Image (tube, helix red, strand yellow):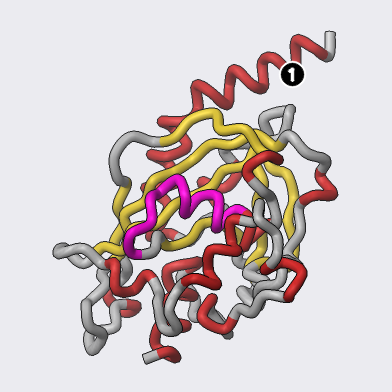
């Protein structure tokens, strides 16, 4: 069961099986004592808890997508570990009983090392944006059957220095590199079956990104 969940996390992450999932992440004592660390709540979860049990009646697992912008309006684009040049926005599943906003800040810290006070929330998408997995990636023997994800996307602005972005946070890293890219760049680079969700999320959040970019251009004189 644990091995299946690790593979599923990788498939839902970028369309390719990952070498390991969050079930194997371990916190250092330093991280577990941080009261402002969203990931610290994991110590209160029972062994074996994971968001695969949160799949809805239609087979969609709830998830948050995270778009972090810099002052210029560029987006943080991250490369998955072992993904053979597979890039994506940070994202992660919502655990049973967890709100999307809580999942946002937990995943934000676990994946790229940023805490709530190091970002400001600009906007979020309305309702759920769904995508289906290709038939070849659906694990028919799993219970409950997961056929895809339903996502809520958040647009954030980095308020801290870039040096605050880190993959070494006491968890097994999801990414090994990141860079700033133009806002629409990910649309042509993400794995095909996620492309429509990316288009819808980016389009809905674009007005706020445009305002940020225009403000930066105005400040540059």
Image position of 176 (left or right of 198): right
The stretch in magenta equals 96-108
Image position of 35 (left or right of 42): right
Identify the residue shown where x is 50% and y is 67%. Answer: 14
Nearer to me, 190 or 127: 127
Quadrant location of the C terminus in the rendered image: top right
Quadrant location of the N terminus in the rendered image: bottom left
Q: Report the residue marked by disc 1.
A: 216
Q: Residue furthest left?
A: 57
Identify the residue shown where x is 30% and y is 45%. Answer: 128
Identify the residue shown where x is 73% and y is 34%. Answer: 159
Q: What secondary structure is found at the residue carrying circle 1?
A: helix
**Label 1 crowd bin: few (<14), some (14–19), many (20+), radius 10 Å:** some
Identify the residue shown where x is 21% and y is 67%. Answer: 59
54, above or below 199, in the image: below
Percent x, y of residue 39: 59, 62
So how many labels did they put on this image? 1
124, above or below 52, in the image: above
Nearer to me, 124 or 54: 54
Q: Is residue 87 magenta?
A: no
By secondary structure, the bulk of the magenta-drawn segment is best described as helix
Q: Is residue 182 visible?
A: no
Picture quadrant where residue 81 is located: bottom right
Image position of 8 (left or right of 56): right
Q: Is residue 3 visible?
A: yes
Percent x, y of residue 113: 70, 56
């Amino acid at each position: 069961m644990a091995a299946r969940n690790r593979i599923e996390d990788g498939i839902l992450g970028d369309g390719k099986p990952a070498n390991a999932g969050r079930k194997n992440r371990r916190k250092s004592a330093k991280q577990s004592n941080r009261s402002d660390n969203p990931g610290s709540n994991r110590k209160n979860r029972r062994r074996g808890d994971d968001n695969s049990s949160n799949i809805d009646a239609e087979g969609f697992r709830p998830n948050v997508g995270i778009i972090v912008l810099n002052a210029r309006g560029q987006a943080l684009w991250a490369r998955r570990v072992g993904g053979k040049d597979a890039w994506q926005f940070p994202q992660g599943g919502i655990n049973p009983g967890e709100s999307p906003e809580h999942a946002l800040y937990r995943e934000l810290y676990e994946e790229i090392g940023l805490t709530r006070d190091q970002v400001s929330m600009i906007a979020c998408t309305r309702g759920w944006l769904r995508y289906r997995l290709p038939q070849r990636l659906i694990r028919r023997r799993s219970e409950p059957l997961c056929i895809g994800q339903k996502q809520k996307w958040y647009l954030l602005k980095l308020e801290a220095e870039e040096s605050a972005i880190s993959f070494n946070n006491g968890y097994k890293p999801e990414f090994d590199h990141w860079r700033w890219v133009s806002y629409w760049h990910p649309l042509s680079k993400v794995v095909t079956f996620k492309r429509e969700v990316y288009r819808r999320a980016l389009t809905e959040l674009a007005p706020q990104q445009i305002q940020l970019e225009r403000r930066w251009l105005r400040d540059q004189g």
